[in-house]
Image (cartoon, rainbow, N blue to C red):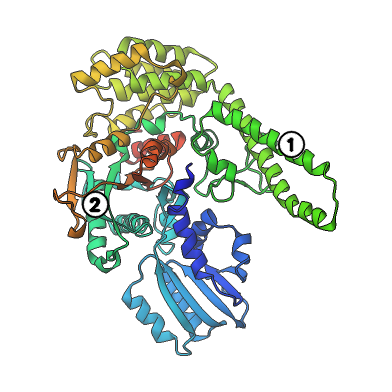
Amino acid sequence: MHSTHSTFLIEACRSYILDAIKGDEMKILLVDDASSSIISLVIGQTEILQHNVLLIQRLSDLNRERLPTMQAVAFIFPTSMNIEQLSKELREPLYKDYRIFFIGGVRNEDLDELAGTDAKEVVSHVREDWCNFHAISPTLFTAIPLTLATPESLHVPPIASLIYSIPLHCTKTRVSNDQITTFRNWSASIASSMLSQFLRPTFIRYVGKSPICTQLADHVWDHIDRNDALWKGKQFKPCQLVIFDRREDPVTPLLFNWNYASMLNDVFGLEEQMCLIVKKGKFAPDPDQPPAVFSPVYDSFFAENFDTDLPTLCETIQKFAKEYQTKNKEGRQSNFESVEDMMAYLDTIPEFKRMGSSVQKHFETVEALTQRIGRRNLYDISEVQQHLACIDSHSEAVRLVEGALNDNQNDLNDKLNIVMLYALRYETTQGNRIKEFKSALESEGCENASAVDALLEFAGHEQRSGDLFKTKTALDKFKTKLTQRFKDVKNVLQQHTPLIYDVVEQLLDQKLPSTTFAQKAVRFYQFRTAQGEPEPKNIVIFIVGGATFEESSCFNTMREKGINVFVGGTHMSSNSKFISTVSEYGRLTGRR
């Protein structure tokens, strides 16, 4: 995590919220489920209360107390339910004054409805705020889950809250109304991520072979075209939008990544709200214990070590603990020569407590990570994964997969993971052992072995349009052999680079093939250079099927060179979530 990025997505969301609640007057903050989820990621309740907010309440709470001397600040999505609730309330207002902040665009007819019910003229302010996305980090975001963004759509399948793209990937005919709602929701999140950073796309690049990416590109283009006035102003900078299909790179979510956020996500399942239950070095659901929050906003240690690998993380946490012990010891041994000295020391006690709590949380977390990694034999598993992803040698791959399958220390899910990676790389290789390895999984009692076939149906060779394993040219094959022969032992567990990184490199070099990535021009000509092409110094990526922490962190070097790359996705993916995605695809298409 780099401090130079602190003004990006998280700060944009914070600024919208803080601007809404500014002022000396005491106020009530009205929220819905979606806005509450956005707020909780970027600003704490304690900080909100410091801005003269007396209470935070749900707009849907019909038992709210009438407070005629208070101001109400509504920070909500313009859903039909919220518009209806507001309209009813404005007829008989509970508060003296209403300031309404709609997240994303609001329809003119909804504004007309509200104006028609505001007979007592209690609405003093209405504004649209462009923050309808989850800001996971300064450069990483996800779309708002459909179940939060449109709660009136009760017929949305439960799986939509986790894996939104599967029903769309299975669609062979005209999309349904539910699926159009999904596209609109994604489009709104993408548009907001750009508007919040004052970015306007000059081109939309998308996987041409993917119907879901093609339709999403159409929706985004239409969203921009219909709301052209929002994108005007000297403060806007050009960017390029890349819409990517998870099926183009099924390898990245299958690999174990060794950065802190990635490890938390893959080992313990870091939720969308960046929370985990931590108890005595173990992670277990305990309703009596509040979750520990892992957030770049609330936790400076996590912010500084978001992308730190495990060996460096262990060294850093030890230094962090020693620093705390030293400061605590110095504080206890202080000699106070005046009341001012004593008061100054007392002022540092809350900071000491916060630092001590952070030391304990991260120390227990890292200890739990190392224990789980050791118990699952993930060092050896990861080395096999990296070999399958990066090195083209079928005979060696067979030997490694056989060894992993025969090792009783390995978890059955990790064995499935390895077989899936083998199947992806050697699907078209004559004499491959996919069926044999799948049978070996079944004989061990793997109930999800059919996910291997489902994976090839979902993201196999026929479904992809790019060169996932970079083996199509003689030069790439030569590079692969060099990597295999002279690979750096220190980085043997981190050889892989996500495919989206190569896509962005080609985009920067203006060599991204139109045969793979189709292009839609946005009618905004001020950003064209003398050569007629945009300068891609700002790039927004949206991954249908889920983004990973690795895909965001792989661009840190580019960001340090002044190229701002924002990575978004339909949700945050992980090893287990991606396999669930593939299994769900197999179930919906009758593959299992």
What amino acid does circle 2 point to? Answer: Ala
Placement of the C terminus among the 4 image quadrants? top left
Is residue 18 toward the left or the right of residue 497 in the image? Answer: right
The mark lying in front, picked from 1 and 2, is 1
Is residue 74 toward the left or the right of residue 470 in the image? Answer: right
Residues at circles 1 and 2 in contact by the CB criterion of under 8 Å: no
Residue designated by label 2: 217
The residue that appears at 24% across and 40% down in the rendered structure is: 507
Residue designated by label 1: 326
The residue that appears at 42% across and 28% down in the rendered structure is: 255
Is residue 126 toward the left or the right of residue 60 in the image? Answer: left
The residue that appears at 41% across and 30% down in the rendered structure is: 254
What amino acid does circle 1 point to? Answer: Thr
Residue 253 position (above or below residue 119): above
Q: Quadrant of residue 457?
A: top left
Q: Secondary structure at mark 2?
A: helix
Q: Quadrant of residue 589?
A: top left
Q: Nearer the viewer, residue 451 or 395?
A: 395
The reply to whether residue 61 is in sight is no
Q: Which badge, 1 or 2, is on the more N-terminal residue?
A: 2
Coordinates of residue 146 in the picture (x, y in percent): 40, 56
